[in-house]
Image: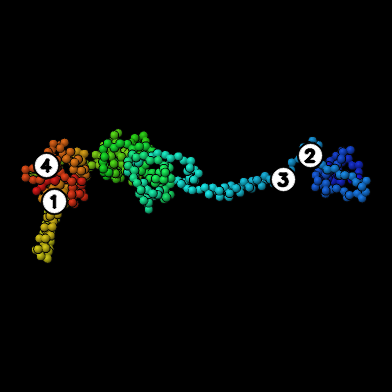
């Protein structure tokens, strides 16, 4: 009867003590078998024709002498490779597809992320528009915010993909973030009426009226700034070109520089003299006008009638010269020479000019008139062409 090696499954010779193939020892009296069912089928002897000669073959289950089953490394390795393949496929394809269904970009965030962001409170640093869409192009203004007014909402990315906007709570519209701050704006103790100032020096602009706050810009001399007003701690609030506001230290000094170099005013309503400095400006203007008039007289005309018409037109025309000078906190913006009068123009309204002149000792009536023996003198709102040069004027003449 043939036997088989329990290690390699080779056929053993009758009475062999060792396997001729692998050299494994054959243990007497112990049944021998091939390592597994597949090997047994491959190495089993032909069935005997006699039932009495048939010997049931015994098979080794691979457990070995201790009974512990040996691992099938080929099967384990194949399973691990399959798991790695499925994981890579999910990461590359399936996760992106499932996430794209949730993607609804608002400020660079998915819809799920946005839902977790709570509304925040902000304050308008200047009068701001509320729009129906997060863009200034093609949107409609549906409301306004006053300076210091509080709102709440979520910060989002504008439709242009670069600007920041606040989506107001309860769908009430959108406000550009450049007009908002997380801090309430400071009180303005002295409005400057958006006065323009061309910086004469490098200027640092801060996020708050405090030099310890964030530095948001540093502008060079020659940059034009719009001055909104002075704060209680001597900062000047400036409007930024990109929107929003900033603060510059030494506000009172900056405001004075914005008015220009000081100019003397010593007004005499009986002679229409404005003082030596301003009178010299009028004299220089008069010389230019006389030179122009002389040139017109010497010009060739088709007739004397045409010459006279041209000269009359010049005589009745007003001439102006722009200035940027300061007088007791006022800004002198221009002087004007008229047919029979002269005017000094101011950036401030008439009421403010009257207040300053009274403080300097001038007798100014409720209607702005200043007593004079033979001439008219007084302060009033600038009119007609003069309104292009100032809000008010001090005029004297016939």
Crowding around mark 3 (Cα neighbors within 10 Å: few <14, some 14 to 19, many 20+) is few
Residue 265 x %, y %: 15, 41
Question: Helix, strand or loop at disc 4?
Answer: loop
Q: Residue at x 79, y 41 (%)?
A: 62
In this rendering, position of residue 347 left or right of residue 374: right
Residue bearing the label numbered 3: 75
Identify the mark nearer the N-term, 1 or 2. 2
**Residue under the point 34% across and 45% down:** 144
Which residue in the structure is indicated by mark 2?
A: 63
Which one is earlier in the sequence, the residue at label 2 or at label 3? 2
Mark 2 secondary-structure assignment: loop
Please give left or right for residue 110 compared with residue 27 in the image.
left
**Labelled pair 2, 4 in contact (Cβ < 8 Å):** no
Q: State the CA–CA distance, disc 4 to disc 1.
A: 19 Å
Please give the name of the residue rendered at 41% of the width and 50% of the height, measured from the top-left corner.
160
x and y, in percent, of residue 149 in the image? 34, 40
């Amino acid at each position: 009867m043939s036997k088989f090696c329990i290690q390699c499954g080779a056929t053993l010779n009758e009475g062999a003590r060792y396997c001729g193939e692998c050299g494994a020892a054959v243990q007497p009296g112990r049944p021998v078998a091939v390592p597994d069912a597949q090997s047994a089928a491959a190495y089993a002897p032909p069935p005997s024709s006699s039932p009495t000669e048939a010997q049931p073959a015994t098979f080794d289950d691979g457990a070995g002498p201790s009974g512990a089953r040996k691992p099938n490394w080929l099967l384990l390795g194949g399973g691990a490779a399959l798991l790695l393949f499925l994981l890579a496929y999910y990461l590359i394809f399936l996760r992106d597809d499932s996430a794209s269904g949730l993607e609804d970009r608002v400020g660079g965030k998915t819809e799920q992320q946005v839902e977790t962001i709570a509304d925040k409170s902000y304050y308008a640093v200047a009068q701001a528009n509320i729009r129906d869409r997060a863009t200034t192009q093609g949107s409609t203004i549906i409301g306004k915010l006053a300076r210091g007014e509080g709102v709440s909402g979520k910060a989002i990315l504008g439709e242009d993909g670069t600007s920041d906007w606040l989506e107001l709570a309860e769908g009430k519209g959108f406000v550009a973030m450049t007009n908002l701050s997380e801090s309430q704006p400071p009180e303005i103790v002295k409005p400057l009426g958006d006065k323009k100032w061309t910086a004469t020096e490098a200027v640092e602009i801060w996020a708050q009226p405090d030099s310890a706050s964030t530095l948001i810009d540093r502008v060079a001399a020659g940059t034009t700034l719009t001055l909104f007003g002075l704060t209680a701690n001597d900062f000047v609030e400036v409007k930024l070109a990109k929107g929003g506001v900033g603060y510059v230290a030494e506000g009172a000094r900056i405001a004075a520089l914005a008015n220009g170099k000081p100019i003397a005013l010593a007004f005499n309503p009986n002679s229409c003299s404005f003082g030596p400095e301003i009178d010299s400006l009028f004299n220089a203007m008069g010389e230019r006008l006389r030179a122009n008039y002389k040139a017109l007289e010497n010009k060739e005309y088709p007739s004397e009638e045409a010459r006279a018409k041209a000269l009359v037109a010049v005589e009745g025309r007003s001439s102006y010269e722009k200035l940027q000078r300061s007088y007791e906190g006022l800004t002198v913006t221009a002087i004007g020479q008229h047919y029979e009068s002269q005017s000094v123009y101011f950036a401030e309204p008439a009421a403010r000019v009257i207040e300053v002149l009274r403080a300097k000792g001038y007798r100014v009536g409720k209607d702005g008139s200043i007593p004079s023996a033979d001439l008219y003198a007084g302060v009033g709102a600038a009119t007609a062409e003069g309104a292009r040069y100032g809000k008010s004027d001090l005029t004297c003449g016939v």
